[in-house]
Image: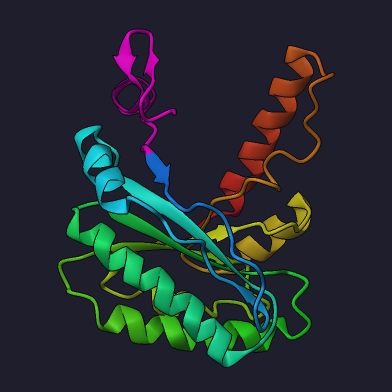
Amino acid sequence: NTMNGTFKGKPSTDYLWNDKKVIPFLKIDKGLADEINGAQLMKPIIGLDQILIKAKKQNIFGTKMRSVIKEANKNSINSVVEQQFEIAEQILASNLIPIVEPEVDINCPEKPIAESYLLEAIEKKVDGLDTNKKIILKLTLPDVDNLFLPLANHDSVLRVVALSGGYAREEANKRLSANKKLIASFSRALTEGLYAQQTDEEFSKLLGSSIESIYRASH
């Protein structure tokens, strides 16, 4: 709806970039499938080719799609990464930049092991990408500091951005600060403490201080 809308008489995407310097991304997934063997793949994305054509025409820069890993099951993690990169190739073919987001649940009982499996699976995939193509990876803040640094340094990776995943903002910022070349793509930690009942002044002040702290934690 936002992609098709207008702001101040301009197409929303042009307004975001030209007036606000905000890069427009389009969420393309249709939600998560039921959990199987410790992972939730994405539901089928019906009509993706048509969506991508329209997104390109509307000056969308890239796309976002999310899966969730809840257990350190290597086969399931490989399936998540396989699905993400299969769709990413389709997005790249449309000359858009995909955000590949295989989120590891922060409550995963063996989170460090799950993240090591995830790193291994992603490295194989990015090594196989055309060197002229770039992706963005959106990953959960890892338990092992700088685990994803090899991905951040990879020629086919434009950025590695971190999702807060349910960590409180203070903890998320702490973890983010400990990881080189990782920048924030927080939502839950960003909106922590914001309520509709606050005055505009209270709301803006808290949001501003939250953005400042997250910015300073980003590398």
Looking at the image, is 170 positioned above or below residue 113?
above
What scheme was used to colour the molecule? rainbow
In screen coordinates, is 83 left or right of 198?
left
The reply to whether residue 152 is in sight is no
Looking at the image, is 112 positioned above or below residue 96?
below
Answer with the quarter of the image where residue 40 lies: bottom right
Q: Residue at x 34, y 65 (%)?
A: 87
Residue 129, position in %: x, y?
A: 23, 76
Magenta region, residue range: 1-24
Answer with the quarter of the image where residue 16 lies: top left
Residue 216, position in %: x, y?
A: 59, 48
Q: Residue at x 40, y 43 (%)?
A: 26
The reply to whether residue 81 is in sight is yes
Return the residue nearer the eye: 12 or 46: 46
In screen coordinates, is 10 left or right of 207?
left
Give the total of numbered labels.
Answer: 0
Q: Is residue 71 magenta?
A: no
Residue 156, position in %: x, y?
A: 27, 71
Q: What is the residue that sits farthest to the right in this orientation?
A: 197
Q: Residue at x 36, y 23 (%)?
A: 12
Residue 154, position in %: x, y?
A: 32, 75
Q: Which quadrant is the N terminus positioned in? A: top left
Answer with the quarter of the image where residue 25 lies: top left
Q: Is residue 10 magenta?
A: yes
In screen coordinates, is 61 left or right of 171?
left
Looking at the image, is 192 positioned above or below residue 19?
below
Return the residue nearer the eye: 149 or 11: 11
Q: Residue at x 59, y 58 (%)?
A: 163
